Amino acid sequence: MKAAVLHSENRIIYQEVDIDHCKEDEVKVQVMAAGICGSDTHKLMTEWKYSLPAIMGHEFSGLIVERGNAVTNVEVGDRVVAIPFTPCKKCSYCNSGEFSLCENHGMLGSKSPGGFAEYVNIKATNVLPINGMDFEEAAMIEPLAVALHGVLHIHPRIGDKAAVFGVGTIGILVIQWLKIAGVKEIIAIDISDEKLEEAKMMGCERTINPLKEELVETVLSYTNGEGVDLSLECAGSKVTQEQCLLVTRKKGKVGYLGIAYSDVLLKEHAFESIFRKELTLKGFWNSYSAPFPGEEWIKSIEYIQNGRIKLKELISHRYKLEETEKAFDMMINRKETYGKVLILPNKE
């Protein structure tokens, strides 16, 4: 089969790769659509901590073309989404149902071959049927479940006001879940006017570009001087990771979904906001709960199928498998404004 193989930092080669028949507890998935995650670009630019050569891609969907003798939950021909995370089911966190915190997990696209290939062998317990769902939408179930994991566990209340920092793919998906949860008013915050326009189309009542407006003053003016009930940080920027502490009201909640890639050093006023306002801070990692893979995945599929979540509008670029390195180059060097970028190894 053909695959886009990472050989070294910033070097992906489109080449022939051998793939075995699937084991008795596995299925072979023909990959139809695979998303590039923001974490993928970071891994490509910095030290790849897993073995090389490697096949990346942990957000993907496809068609089952082979199944092992012990598999009973799916059939050849089924359309499925891949669950990239494999918990050990032995550590204390797995035993308590906190699968996202598993200490010995496996991961497609990093610890084992992922979706930037024509085919992938996956444990049958790590696929979910999507029925007639579009493959491109299904490839976005993983980030949609990540967004829902954060929203579910920040516990929004009907009528809350929220600020979402960073309206890339995860931020836009968080906004949609907050609307479904009954949040009254959402303020989208980003330094890209194009992304803020997209947030408006997704139902954001207010937007702020901090390069053009004073952030804290503007948020306070929108909230009767109190601040928002919830802040969700989705940018992974040390600037926004501090700012969300400043715009949240007393007794409010701050949720961190963005990955910090550098030290976060808080100014005195920001740090004092934590205890003077008695803020609740929560971090959210991954998207899994019990029973595995959890309600995040089941509800994501349900809400896509009933039309309450918009995904197609978020896809900005589609590349063939042989163009994978080109896709990463576009994203890393920001040659174009992009939303969700997909690789299509076996385009229908």
Image: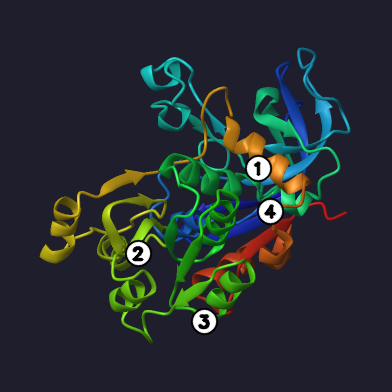
The residue to which callout 2 is attached is 237
Marks 2 and 1: which is nearer the front?
1
Q: Residue at x 61, y 39 (%)?
A: 113
Q: Do labels 1 and 4 touch, CB within 8 Å?
A: yes
Residue 180 image offset from top left, x and y in percent: 60, 51
The amino acid type of the residue labelled 3 equals Asp
Q: Secondary structure at mark 1?
A: helix
Within 10 Å of the Cα at label 3, are there few (<14), some (14-19), or many (20+) other Cα atoms? few
Q: Which mark is residue 39?
A: none
Estimate the spatial distance between the alpha carbons at disc 1 and disc 3, rounded to whole Å.
28 Å
The amino acid on which the numbered mark 4 sits, given as a three-letter code, is Ile
Give coordinates of residue 218: x percent, y percent: 34, 78
Q: Is residue 20 or residue 69 the one in the foreground?
A: 69
Q: CA distance from mark 3 to mark 4?
A: 23 Å
Q: Amino acid at mark 1?
A: Ser
Taking depth in this image into account, of 100 and 154 the one nearest to the observer is: 154
Residue identified by numbered label 1:
300
x then y, percent, for residue 306: 77, 46
Q: Earlier in the sequence, mark 2 or mark 3?
A: 3
Residue depth check, mark 3 versus mark 4: number of the one nearer the observer: 4
Mark 3 secondary-structure assignment: helix
Element type where label 2 sits in the image: loop
Determine whether, in the image, residue 282 is placed left or right of residue 65.
Answer: left
Residue topped by disc 3: 193
- Label 4: which residue? 309
